Amino acid sequence: MAVNITEVRVKLTEAKKNRLQAFCSITIDNDFVVRDLKVIEGHKGAFVAMPSRKLTDRCPGCGGKNHLMSQYCNDCGTRLDEKRASKGAGRLKLHADTAHPINSKCREEIQEKVLAAYKEEVERSKLPGYKPPKYEDMDDLDSSDFDSEDV
């Protein structure tokens, strides 16, 4: 059974030099929305990154939650062990997908439809008088909210 993506919403980012090119949301079967997909310009061209969250751990002193790259606890200020983040496939694993396809066919279908909608929006943005579409679910998203490490 193929994924029935019934809508793709695209919000282009302002920073053209940034690898993060757009935020997207997809609607599946007019019933289920997945937000915060990202179009990223990679070394081999644009690709779609699934929604993710920063991984955290707890301070051994107070139990407060901290991002894995934090050097000091956000709550008590205790110095944290720099080697506490695990490596996966040779890279430091700092994010975990919150939603993702479980097979390559589904991933390819999502990527194909999202990138097609992204390219259409880029072309529309070149027209005189272009105004980005208003999407309440994406109006508060801004590329400045993300570090280059986040993408």
Image (spheres, helix red, strand yellow):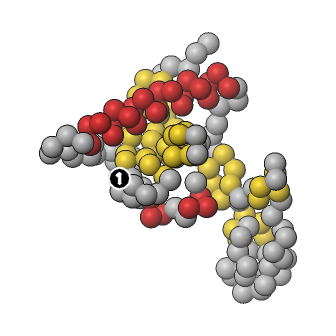
Mark 1 — residue?
139
Task: Give the percent coordinates (x, y) of residue 122.
Answer: 33, 40
Q: Taking the image as drawn, is residue 79 in sight?
A: yes
Which of 90/136 is in front? 90
Query: The residue tagged with tag 1: helix, strand or loop?
Result: loop
Front-most of residues 84 and 32: 84
Is residue 140 among what the camera can see?
no
Which residue is farthest left? 129
Name the image quarter holding residue 102.
top right
Q: Residue at x 44, y 64 (%)?
A: 144
- Look at the image and tell me in which quarter the C terminus lies: bottom right
Front-lying residue, 99 or 19: 19
| On screen, residue 39 above or below 106 | below
Query: In the displayed structure, would residue 145 be above or below residue 7?
Result: below
Residue type marked 1:
Asp
Q: Is 37 rendered above or below residue 70? A: above
Residue 48 place in picture, x, y as percent: 55, 39
Give the image quarter of residue 84.
bottom right
Q: Residue at x 20, y 40 (%)?
A: 127
Is residue 97 shown left or right of residue 26? right
Q: Residue at x 78, y 70 (%)?
A: 58
- Report the label total: 1
Image-based side of 82 in relation to 67, left or right = right
Q: Residue at point 39% right, 40% down?
A: 10
Q: Specify the farthest residue to the bottom.
A: 77
Badge 1: how crowded within 10 Å, few (<14), some, or many (20+)? few
Residue 54 position, x and y percent, is 65, 59
Nearest to the observer: residue 59 or residue 38: 38
Spot the residue most to the top: 1
Image quarter in which the N terminus is found: top right
Residue 49 relative to residue 11: left or right: right
Residue 60 location in percent, x, y? 85, 77
